Amino acid sequence: TYLDQKNKFTKTKFEENSIFYHLFNELNSDEFTSMISKITEIKDICGDHELFGGGLHQSINGAFLNVHVDYNYHPTTKYHRRCNLIIYLNKNWKDEYGGSLELWDKNMTKCEQKLSPKFNNMVVFNTNDYSFHGHPDPLNCPENINRKSIALYYYSNGRPKNEISRIHGTLFRNGPGILERDNQWVHHPFDGDGMITAVKFINGQASLTNKFVRTKGFQEEEKKNKFIYRGVFGTQKK
C-alpha cells in the first residue's frame, strides 16, 4: 500500500527445518512467551504461529511507515493483541539512512522515543488504542542496503476492561477509479485507472482516504485528458 507505507515486504512462510523456521518457533514457544509475560507484566501471553502481520520485514530506499496504532484482535483466534517484539538485523547501519522506530505520545503530538534499526537492537512495547508508532520519514539508504527486521506479535484471551475497545484496523482496496476521460467511457470498470482506497476503523468510527496509483501511463493520460493505452477489457485508445 502507498497510503500509510511504501516499499515494505514481508515473509511469513519458511521451509521446514530452516533457520528461520526454528527461530520463529522458538520465539513463539511457551518458554519464550513466559519471559515476555514477565517483562511486560501481561498474564497468559501466547504467540502466533501464523505470524499474521509479522515475520521477516524488509524495506528498501524510500520506504516509510506512517505513525499508527495496530489492529487489536487476531483475525483467526479473536485474541487481543497485547505487545510487539521487533529485532533489527542491519549491520553497518548509518544514522543518515534514517529508519528509526518512533514511539509517540498517546495524543500523537510528539515523538517520545526513537530506536535505531542497528543490528541486534530489540524493542518490546505494549499495543493498545494509543500506542502510536512508525518510521514516517522515507529511508535514505543506498540501493544495495535495506532495512531488515524480525517482528512478532503476542496475544492474550482477554485484557483489562478499561483497555477493551471495538475492533479497529484498516481495510485496503485496490480497484478502478477514473472511468471517463474527455467524454469517453471505459467499456468495462476494470479498465479504469487504479485507485487504492483505505477505510480505517477506530473508536467506533470510520474514515476514508484514497490515492491513485500514479504510474507513468496514468500521468500521461492525466496530462492529455484522454485514454492513450488500450484497456485489457476492450476499451480503445482515443
Image (cartoon, rainbow, N blue to C red):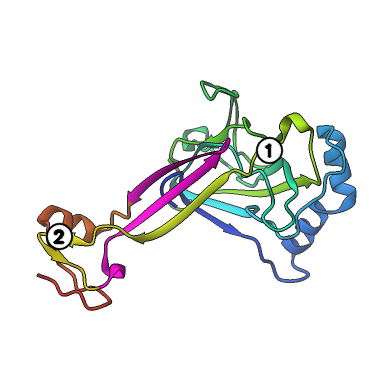
Residue at image position (70%, 41%) is 84
Relative to 82, 169 lies left or right? left
Instruction: Kindly identify which residue carries mark 2.
Output: 181
Q: Is residue 115 above or below residue 213?
A: above
Q: Main secondary structure of the magenta part?
A: strand
Q: Is residue 106 above or below residue 215?
A: above
Name the foreground residue: 37 vs 57: 37
The secondary structure type at the circle numbered 2 is strand
- The reply to whether residue 101 is in sight is no
Quarter containing the C terminus: bottom left
How many residues crowd around disc 2 within 10 Å: few (fewer than 14), some, or many (20 or more)?
some
Q: What's drawn in magenta, residue-wise?
A: 188-211
Q: Residue furthest bottom?
A: 234
Percent of width and height locating residue 133: 58, 34
200 in the magenta segment: yes
Residue at image position (90%, 49%) is 31
Residue at image position (79%, 37%) is 159
First in residue order: circle 1 vs circle 2: 1
Name the foreground residue: 186 vs 220: 186
Task: Identify residue type, mark 2.
Answer: Arg
Report, in whole angstroms, how far the alpha carbon at label 1 lies from the one at label 2: 51 Å
Instruction: Kindly identify which residue carries mark 1.
Output: 121
Can you tell which of label 1 and label 2 is closer to the viewer?
Answer: 2
Percent of width and height locating residue 6: 44, 49
18 in the magenta segment: no
Residue at image position (27%, 72%) is 188
The secondary structure type at the circle numbered 1 is loop
